[in-house]
Image (spheres, coloured by chain):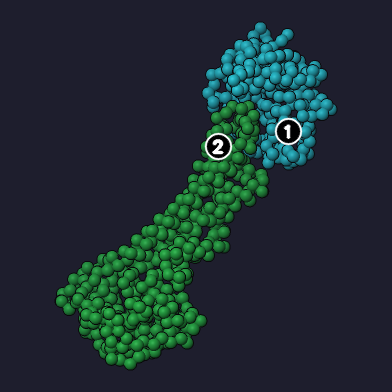
Amino acid sequence: MLFIGARNLWRSKLRLVLVAGLIGVPFFLLLVMQSIGDAVQRQTEILKQNVNNTLQLRARGSMGHVNMVGNEDILPQDALAKIKAIAHVARAEPYLLAMTPTEGHNFAMIVGVDPQDTRRLESHGEAGNPKILFGRDLTDEDRGKRVAIIGQGVAKWAGIKPEDVGRATLTLDLKRTHPVIFALDRPPVTLTVAGIYASGYVFGDMQLFMPINTFREVYGIAEGISWLYVRADSAANLPAVERQLRTMLGDIADIISPTTVAEFQTTATAAVQRLAAGGIGLAAALMVVVVFFVMLLVVRERAWEIGTFKALGASDSGIVASFLTEAVLLCAIGALTGALLFGLWGGALAQLIFGLGITPFLPAHYTTLAATLALAPRFGSATLTVLIVASLFAALAGSAWSIRQIIRLSPMEAIRHE
Amino acid sequence: MNEPTVTNERVELAQLRGVSKFYRKGDETIKALDGIDMTVAEKGMVAIVGPSGSGKSSLLHILGAMDRLTAGEVIVAGQSLGTLPEAGLTDFRRKTVGIVFQSFNLIPNLDALENVMLPMEFNGIAREARRQRAQQLLSRVGLAARLKHKPRELSGGEQQRVAIARALANDPPLILADEPTGNLDSKTSQMIYELLKEIARERTVIVVTHAEALAELSNRIVHIKDGKLVA
C-alpha cells in the first residue's frame, strides 16, 4: 500500500506542480524566517563571545575621554605591562578616546585603537564587530598614519559619500567646544577616510576609529590609556582575573564586569527571534491548511477508490498508510521546492524582510543596516529537522482527518460518497 | 474459510434470513430490502433481476459485506456477517468474495496486471506468486497481450475482463457482479456473460442485471421488486 501511495503522487502532474508550489511557498517563508532568527542569534553569540570573558578598566570615576569635561583622567601607561603579566590574561587592548562636536548638541566619539585589536563601539554592545560597508578596515600599515574609518552616521554628517572613500578627508578641529567637551590647544588634523562601517545602532555609527599611535600624536597624549579591555583565557577564569586586577590596581581603576553589556542586544535578538518564531508558526500553519484542503479534495475525489480498496479486502490501516504516504511525499516535494526557492532567493528575501522589519525604527540613512547581517541561505541540522518535522506534521495533520471521514464508511458508502 | 453448510443434500453457500436494509433520504425512510429470505447454492450462476430501485444491488452488496444490513441474518460460507467485527469483514471480503462493478472500478494509475495483483497484495501473497497468478488470470480472460496497459488504454469490455480477473485473484468461492454489462454494448455484454458462466462452473456467481435476455443464461433467476423477492 505504501508503494501505491507513492505512485499516486504522479497521477496528475498538474496537481503535483500546484501542490508543490502551494506547500513550497509557505515552506520557503518558514526557512526565510528561520534564517533571520539564526542570523540574529549568530550575531548575538559573536557579541557574547567577545564580551563574556572581557573586563573593561577605566581611571576611577572617569569616562576616560581626553577632552570630556570632568572625565579626562586616564589610566597610567604602566598598567598595561602589569596586567599582561597576570595569570589567565589572554589579551589586553588599550584604547584612547576623545569627543568632537557634530551638529546641534550632538557629538561623535573618536577612538584610538591598535589595528590588531577589536573595534569596540561605545555605549552599547562594546563587543563591536562593526561591518565595513565601503572601503577597508584599518591595517598594520596604517599605524602612525592619518587614516581613519568612520561610522555611516559620521559619514553622513561629514558629507562623505561611499564612492569617495579612500580619497575623502575629514578634519578634526580640536578647539571646538560643546557643553561636555573642552577645547584642546592643538592644531586641526585632517584624516583620510579609508572605510565606512555600519554598527547596527545609532550611536555606534557616530564614531571614528584611528590607529592609537596616530591618536596620541593628534591629541598630544604621549602616555596613558582611556580604556583597557582585558580578556581572560576563558569566561570561567574571568572572576579570578578580576580579583587579581583589583588587588594590583587598587583604587586607581574602575573595573567594569561587562556580563550585562550584551543585554540590550540579547533583548533585541529575543524580539527578532520571537518575530521569526511567529513567522515560522504562521508558515507552518499555512502549510497544514494547504495540505489539509489538498488532502480533503484528494480523499473526496478518490472516495470511490477507497471504497474499491475496501471492497477488494484492503485493511483500513493499509488504506490510511497509502494516503498518508502520498501526503507525506507531497509535503516532502513541497518542502524540497521551498528549499530550492530558498536556495535561490532566500538570502535576498530574508535581507529584505529583515530590513523592512527594522528600518522603520531607524533614521533614513540606516537603510543599509540589513546588509550588515549575514543572511545567507544556509541549511544546518536544525533547518533539516524543521524541514522533516514540518513536512510530517503538515502531512499527518492535513490528511488524517479527511481520510478518517471516508475510511469508517462501508465499501459501498465510500464508493457512493460525494 | 469455513466449510459451506449442507442442507437436504444441496450444498449452500449463502443463506439470508429476514434481511432488511433501510436508509434515510431526507425525512423519508427507504426500504431497499424488506425481509428477504433466500439461499444460494454453491457453484452455478444466479441472476438477480428487477427494475431500477428494486433493491437488487443492495442485496448483492449485503451478500458481499459491502454494505451494512439493518435487520436479519446473512450467512456466507459459514460466516455470519452480522456478527463479524470490522477486521473480520475485511478478511471476508478479501478471501470469500470477488466483486465486479458496473463501472469497472479499476485503479487508474495501475496497469491491468497491477490491478489484478492488488487483492492478492491485500491477502499477503508474495510478489512473484501474485504476478504469476495475475498473468494466468489475464490470459484466461483473453488479455495476455494487454498486461501493461492502463485502464484508460483499454476498451470497456477489456476493462470489465480485467475486473473479472481481479475478482478471481484470491480464488474466492463467491463472485458478485453488479450490472457487469451496464456500460457495454450487446456483443461485448454477451462475451462477458459467457465468461461469467464459465467461471460459475467452479464457483458461485451472482449477477445483478435488468437485462432478461442475459439473465436467461443463468442457472437460476431471482426476481426482486420493491425490496422483496417475487415468484
- Tell me if A62 is positioned left or right of A154 in this view: left
Residue A147 in the image, given as x and y percentages of width and height: 40, 86
Real-space Cα distance between discs 1 and 2?
Answer: 30 Å
Between A302 and B95, the residue placed more toward the observer is A302
The answer to whether mark 1 and mark 2 are in CB contact below 8 A is no
- Crowding around mark 2 (Cα neighbors within 10 Å: few <14, some 14 to 19, many 20+) is some
Whether residue A297 is situated above or below residue A234 in the rendered picture: above
Between A179 and B222, the residue placed more toward the observer is A179
Residue B224 in the image, given as x and y percentages of width and height: 71, 14
Give residue A402's mark.
2
Whether residue B24 is situated above or below residue B133 in the rendered picture: above
Residue A277 shows up from this direction = yes
At a point 37% along the width and 76% down the height, the residue shown is A206
The amino acid sitting under disc 1 is Val
At a point 45% along the width and 68% down the height, the residue shown is A373
Residue A18 in the image, given as x and y percentages of width and height: 62, 49
Mark 1 or mark 2, which is nearer to you? Answer: 2
Q: Quadrant where the N terminus of chain A lies?
A: top right
Between A306 and B91, the residue placed more toward the observer is A306
Marked residue chain, label 1 = B
Between A391 and B188, the residue placed more toward the observer is A391
Q: Residue furthest top?
A: B8
- Crowding around mark 1 (Cα neighbors within 10 Å: few <14, some 14 to 19, many 20+) is many
Element under label 1?
A: helix
- Asked if marks 1 and 2 fall on the same chain, the answer is no
Residue A19 in the image, given as x and y percentages of width and height: 60, 48
Whether residue A413 is situated above or below residue B28 in the rendered picture: below
User: In the rendering, what colour is chain A?
Assistant: green
The amino acid sitting under disc 2 is Ser
Chain with cyan colouring: B
Give residue A101's mark.
none
Residue holding disc 1? B162
